Amino acid sequence: MDFTVAIRTYNGATRIGKILERLKSQTQTDGIEWEIVVVDNNSSDSTATIIQAQQETWPSHSRLHYFFEAKQGASYARARCIQEAQSELIGFLDDDNYPADDWVFECYQFAQDYPQAGAYSGQIHGEYEVEPPANFKRIANFIPIIERGNKPLCYTSYKYARKKVYPPGAGLVIRKSVWLDTVPKKLVLQGPVGTSLNTKGEDIEALSYLAMAGWEIWYNPKMHIYHEIPARRFERDYLIEFFKGVGLSRHRTRMLNYKPWQKPWFTMAYFVNDFRKLLRHAWRYRDVLGDDAVAAAELQFFKSCLVSPLFIWKMLYFGRDKNSKS
């Protein structure tokens, strides 16, 4: 098997059919042995029925597999995808990501051209149910919408590495052996769990381990997926909750690259800088925070960054306590 498309879905009955139709129409794959692995992350809707119906008429150019994962959480679903994948190359799609017709081919080809890449991702374009707010570009990378130009770039080169910029999990391709050798089986950040967004950041945590092991992480502009974004994701309450989760994960992803003796000093430095950003943002947007959902979400992000060390320490403490009791 040359390539695995791994789809994690939770209550995706209204979405999974569309992504499977896009995968049916993949082009330039005659010389590629590939499969689709769908991991149902404890859905309560008709997701399983829809996939089983698709399996009965699935074309011969690939294979379609279905697995049920009862442990809810994006990292659990991803781990099950990796476990079941029969290929060294695994490309992840969420159930609201729709690949271009040549996505499988471009994913596979990039791995041949860049053997030093342990992981890589491409462009993510928005398919919006409603027009985004005027200042949406300020937060687009978090949603995520990723459009970094038409030339390949290395996230682990100096320019991006010092900012710790990594691609999101949507559309990410990994080498299975590299992932298993470098990423812990259990991450501190579990990613979205059902509808909860409090432990986002699992993608950055995992990719940090790849980078620390010396593997390169790349952006391939020839890989295109389209992210379907419903109107509710631009609502004020959703954006605030979303950025609360992003901010709470910050301490974990920031500290991964530092030695134990460095962490207290950098924790304090980040706290001071986050507090400065919070005050500046609150003052700058003081007259529009009640009406501007993006500005309010950014303010929540800075607030959550401030308490992120306490949140992560609490997670680690109770996690350790739970393990000792078991």
Image (cartoon, rainbow, N blue to C red):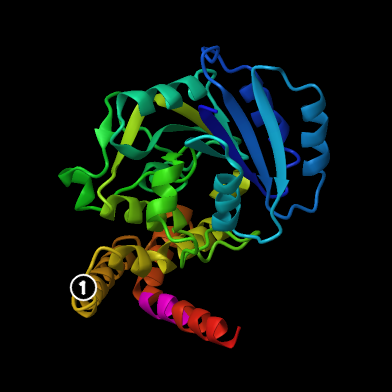
Q: Percent from the top left, x then y, of residue 253?
A: 35, 63
Is residue 286 shown to the viewer in this render? no
Residue 133 included in the magenta stretch of the image: no
Q: Quadrant of the N terminus?
A: top right
The residue sitting at 60% across, 52% down in the picture is 77
Give the residue at mark 1: 266
Q: Nearer the viewer, residue 73 or 240?
A: 73
- 274 vs 61, left or right, is left
Residue 312 included in the magenta stretch of the image: yes
Q: Quadrant of the C terminus?
A: bottom right
Q: Percent from the top left, x then y, of residue 128?
A: 56, 35
Task: Find residue 7 and report its image quarter.
Answer: top right
Q: Percent from the top left, x then y, of residue 15?
A: 69, 37
What count of labels does the image hold?
1
- 312 vs 6, left or right, is left
Amino acid at pointer 1: Phe
Identify the magenta region: 309-314
Q: In the image, is residue 201 above or below residue 269?
A: above
The residue sitting at 39% across, 52% down in the picture is 181
Task: Find residue 286 and report its image quarter.
Answer: bottom left
Q: Percent from the top left, x then y, of residue 72?
A: 65, 60
Q: In the image, is residue 285 above or below residue 251?
A: above
Judging from the image, what secondary structure is the residue with disc 1 in? helix
